[in-house]
Image (tube, grey):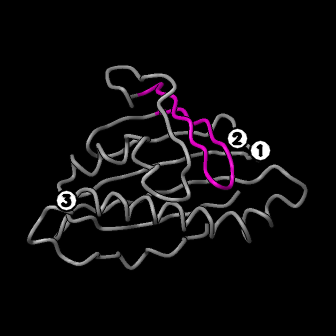
């Protein structure tokens, strides 16, 4: 199993960033996410616990289930099914107010279920996941700060590179 973490500061209020990131249809604002939809609403909120999100990326198909939902601080998910097949232990997005906006930390732990899956995950999947997560967070930054005259330049946290654990 490999863990990938992408960190980004988005110059917008925490609640706005949380809502944007929880709403899976926003992910299609990047070229790597071809389709995203809410297949089943969650308890108490459309993207709350039990919600099922379905994504088609250029590299595969993923059916995610929200397992924890604590707006505007964090939500967790697990990939129940995917193609190519993968083992997934945890996906988590956390949101923290910081100087200049909201720090988003997006972490996923997974392994491709193919022969030599760990090596494939490390060599191929990690850079792709890091790239796509980064592009989704770039889209959030653009969407949430586009009309602000005082918009600062994008601020990446020091950990914007993949963290392998």
Q: Give the Cα separation between the discs numbered 1 and 3.
A: 36 Å
Q: Quadrant of residue 120?
A: bottom right
151 displayed left or right of 43? left
Residue under label 2: 82
Question: In the figure, 45 relative to 131: above or below?
Answer: above
Q: Earlier in the sequence, mark 2 or mark 3?
A: 3
Q: Is mark 2 in CB contact (under 8 Å) with mark 1?
A: yes
Mark 1 neighbour density, 10 Å: few (under 14) some (14–19) many (20 or more): some
Who's the residue at 72% across and 68% down the image? 124
Q: Nearer the viewer, residue 143 or 100?
A: 143
Question: Residue 46 shows which numbered tag?
Answer: none
In percent of width and height, residue 156 lies at: 34, 76
Q: Give the Cα separation between the discs numbered 2 and 1.
A: 5 Å
Question: In the figure, 153 relative to 98: above or below?
Answer: below
Q: Give the Cα separation between the discs numbered 2 and 3.
A: 32 Å
Q: Which residues are magenta?
A: 49-67
Q: Nearer the viewer, residue 24 or 34?
A: 34
In percent of width and height, residue 82 lies at: 70, 41
Q: Earlier in the sequence, mark 1 or mark 3?
A: 3
Who's the residue at 45% across and 49% down the image? 27
Residue under label 3: 12
Tell me which secondary structure the magenta stretch mostly adopts.
strand
Who's the residue at 71% across and 56% down the image? 1
Q: Quadrant of residue 138?
A: bottom left
Who's the residue at 57% across and 42% down the image? 55
Find numbered disc 1 in the image and state the secondary structure of the residue it sits on. Answer: loop
Find numbered disc 3 in the image and state the secondary structure of the residue it sits on. Answer: loop
> Can residue 90 be found in the magenta stretch?
no
Mark 3 neighbour density, 10 Å: few (under 14) some (14–19) many (20 or more): many
Question: Residue 85 shows which numbered tag?
Answer: 1
In percent of width and height, residue 52 lies at: 52, 29
In percent of width and height, residue 73 lies at: 29, 46
């Amino acid at each position: 199993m490999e863990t990938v973490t992408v960190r980004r500061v988005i110059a917008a209020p925490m609640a706005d960033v949380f809502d944007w990131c929880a709403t899976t249809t926003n992910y299609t604002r990047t070229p790597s996410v071809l389709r995203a939809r809410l297949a089943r609403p969650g308890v108490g909120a459309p993207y709350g616990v039990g919600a099922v999100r379905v994504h088609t990326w250029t590299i595969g198909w993923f059916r995610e289930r929200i397992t924890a939902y604590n707006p505007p601080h964090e939500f967790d998910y697990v990939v129940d099914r995917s193609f190519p097949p993968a083992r997934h232990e945890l996906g988590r997005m956390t949101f923290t107010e910081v100087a200049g906006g909201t720090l988003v930390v997006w972490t996923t732990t997974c392994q491709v279920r193919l022969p030599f899956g760990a090596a494939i995950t490390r060599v191929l999947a990690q850079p792709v996941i890091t790239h796509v997560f980064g592009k989704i967070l770039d889209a959030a930054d653009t969407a949430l700060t586009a009309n602000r005259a005082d918009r600062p330049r994008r601020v990446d946290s020091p950990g914007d590179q993949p963290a392998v654990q």
